């Protein structure tokens, strides 16, 4: 063993030790590795920083931008809503829906891409169902890795194994040759990830301030039971009049905060301003006390027909609220709601007031506003977002729904089309994955789905630095000969064993190496050795190669084993040891299934 090999192995063990110690951030450890390699001379300075220019890192950055576009336009929330409808509020049922969906996508596209696209979906689901993201993000990443085992194009190691068979003059693996083994692992893996893994995962989630939901705002301001829908009849005196003309607040203490016309919310693009004309058949979304609503219906010719949950759900997507406190220099202090002209100035309606922590309920129209009053403003999401730029208010809280809904929901079909086109280009091979992802990222910005500031903010710098910083260590292991030394020594112990024990050794070797270096590089290194062993024993190489390919995808036990694990590290707030606790049993299960099923399909 020469000095370079000893140095690289020591660096590898030290890096793993620092990850397990968990006192220094993982991205900082990765940068320390880059610095040490740069001054060591094992690899060139250019190779030391080559990870930052790797296509994998650029692809992940592009996928962050695409995922942000899906999030900002509401596509992620819509997918989350579908999964929520299928799985309800139960963590187990949601995982039972989520895992097969992600695995299915990973079978035909990049596992990294699938995870990057689903992270905002899972976070949206967790906010809606009030679940811990840490309970769902690691199962998400593991499901994508298992999905990659199921087809020829699911993951690069499968392609490498098939190519090596062809290079040896043998029949390569077909597209679905991996499916029976990967399918069995998916079946048992799903049961493990749904019923056992959540018990091993930490209770921590994304460390961010919790936002109350719209329902909680309604309870806080005492308006939860005062929401109504009123249909304007043909003979109503409201027809042709404006909201201002009818003085509904002053006459009935009723506030009309939205109008639904022909099934569409008028205020989603145009707020209910004082000049908004009311038409026959309009549905007025209003709040007020029961006696005021009753008088309004009798005197103006409206018909009351309730405010069901599905209407609340529809309204939440298009319409929201924000809690603000009046600034001491606000021009509305000392004025009533009407005198403050909130609709004209801010395109928002005041639907609740807190004074000294107590709600004034609906009897506040004629009450002069005071410094320190807290107002609940209602209107389109775009106008609520614009409040951040106002100097008259101190923004206190926005509802959780605001993080799931965007003023750009009208761009959702564009964002969805961009994503589908990206997947089609990647799956068909018409364009390289890198080109397809970069094209989609640029299209998200040019189409207005996101702006450049949002694109920059979407880049998860910690994950990118961690991946880019660890790639040179794998290169150093290859160039120094440390990797060859490990492989040669371990395989020397397997030469005279039975075929089943040889496969077990190949699985262990491949799986362990894949926890710390690229699974593709591991497969390239071990695949020709496994063919040589099979040919030396005059046995069929297929079960050996299949074992190596599946083992390379069992990168479950460390956050650096695969980019998909690194992607969920930060949003899931995981530690290094969390992957060991949850991933190691799944690795062992995958090995037992592979060693059992593979010889049945590919006899020795």
Image (tube, rainbow, N blue to C red):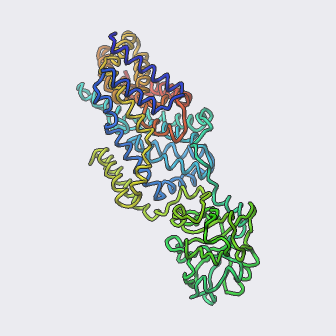
Please tell me which residue is depicted at 72% across the width and 67% down the height of the picture: 225
In the rendered image, the vertical position of residue 593 relative to residue 174, given as above or below: above
| Foreground of the two, 131 or 490 | 131
Outermost residue toward the front in this view: 329
Q: Is residue 17 left or right of residue 352?
A: left
| Foreground of the two, 289 or 29 | 29
Query: Can residue 215 be seen here?
Result: yes
Q: Quadrant of the C terminus?
A: top left
Q: Write down the quadrant of residue 519 in the picture.
A: top left
In the rendered image, the vertical position of residue 99 relative to residue 489, given as above or below: below
Please tell me which residue is depicted at 36% across the width and 61% down the height of the picture: 447
| Foreground of the two, 537 or 105 | 105
Query: Can residue 104 be seen here?
Result: no
* Tally of numbered tags: 0
Please tell me which residue is depicted at 45% across the width and 23% down the height of the picture: 15
Residue 271 position within the rendered picture, expressed as x and y whole percent measured from the top left: 54, 74
Q: Is residue 495 left or right of residue 170?
A: right
Q: Is residue 356 left or right of residue 379?
A: right
Q: Write down the quadrant of residue 499 in the picture.
A: top left
Residue 320 position within the rendered picture, expressed as x and y whole percent measured from the top left: 58, 64
């Amino acid at each position: 063993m020469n000095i370079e090999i000893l140095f690289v192995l020591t660096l590898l063990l030290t890096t793993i030790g620092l990850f397990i110690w968990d006192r220094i951030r993982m991205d900082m450890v990765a940068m320390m590795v880059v610095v040490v390699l740069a001054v060591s001379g094992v690899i060139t300075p250019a190779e030391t920083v080559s990870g930052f220019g790797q296509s994998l890192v650029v692809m992940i950055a592009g996928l962050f931008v695409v995922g942000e576009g899906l999030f900002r336009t509401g596509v992620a929330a819509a997918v989350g809503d579908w999964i929520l409808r299928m799985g309800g509020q139960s963590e187990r049922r949601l995982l039972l829906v989520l895992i097969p969906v992600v695995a299915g996508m990973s079978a035909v596209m990049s596992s990294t891409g699938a995870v990057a696209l689903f992270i905002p979906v899972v976070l949206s689901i967790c906010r809606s169902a009030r679940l811990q993201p840490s309970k769902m993000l690691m199962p998400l990443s593991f499901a994508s890795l298992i999905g990659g085992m199921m087809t020829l194009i699911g993951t690069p190691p499968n392609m490498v194994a098939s190519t090596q068979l062809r290079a040896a003059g043998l029949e390569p693996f077909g597209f679905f040759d991996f499916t029976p083994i990967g399918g069995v692992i998916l079946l048992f893996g799903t049961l493990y990830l749904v019923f056992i893994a959540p018990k091993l995962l930490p209770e921590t989630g994304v460390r961010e301030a919790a936002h109350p939901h719209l329902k909680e705002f309604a309870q806080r301001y005492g308006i939860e039971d005062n929401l109504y829908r009123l249909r304007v009849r043909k003979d109503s005196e409201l027809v042709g009049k404006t909201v201002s003309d009818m003085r509904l607040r002053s006459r009935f203490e009723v506030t009309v905060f939205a109008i639904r016309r022909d099934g569409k919310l008028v205020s989603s693009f145009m707020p209910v301003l004082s000049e908004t004309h009311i038409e026959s058949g309009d549905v007025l979304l209003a709040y007020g006390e029961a006696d005021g609503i009753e008088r309004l219906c009798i005197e103006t010719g409206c018909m009351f027909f309730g405010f069901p949950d599905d209407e609340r759900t529809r309204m939440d997507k298009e319409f929201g609220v924000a809690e603000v406190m009046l600034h001491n220099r606000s021009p509305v202090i000392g004025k009533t709601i009407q005198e403050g002209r909130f609709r004209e100035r801010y395109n928002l309606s005041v639907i609740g007031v807190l004074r000294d922590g107590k709600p004034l309920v609906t009897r506040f129209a004629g009450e002069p506003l005071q410094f320190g009053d807290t107002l609940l403003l209602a209107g389109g999401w775009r106008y609520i977002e614009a409040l951040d730029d106002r100097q008259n208010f101190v923004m206190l809280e926005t509802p959780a729904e605001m993080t799931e809904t965007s003023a750009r929901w009208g761009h959702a079909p564009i964002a969805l089309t961009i994503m589908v086109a990206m997947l089609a280009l990647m799956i068909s091979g018409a364009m390289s994955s890198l080109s397809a992802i970069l094209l989609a990222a640029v299209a998200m910005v040019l189409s207005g789905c996101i702006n450049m500031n949002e694109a920059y903010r979407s880049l998860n710098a910690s994950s990118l630095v961690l991946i880019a910083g660890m790639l040179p260590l794998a290169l150093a292991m290859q160039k120094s000969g440390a990797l060859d030394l490990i492989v040669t020594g371990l395989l020397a112990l397997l030469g005279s064993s039975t075929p089943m024990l040889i496969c077990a050794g190949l699985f262990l070797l491949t799986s362990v190496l894949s926890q710390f270096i690229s699974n593709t590089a591991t497969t390239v290194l071990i695949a020709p050795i496994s063919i040589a062993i099979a040919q030396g024993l005059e046995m069929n190489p297929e079960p050996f190669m299949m074992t190596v390919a599946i083992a390379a995808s069992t990168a479950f036990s460390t956050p650096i084993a695969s980019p998909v694990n690194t992607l969920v590290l930060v949003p899931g707030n995981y530690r290094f040891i969390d992957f060991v606790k949850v991933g190691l049993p799944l690795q062992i299960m995958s090995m037992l299934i592979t060693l059992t099923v593979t010889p049945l399909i590919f006899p020795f």
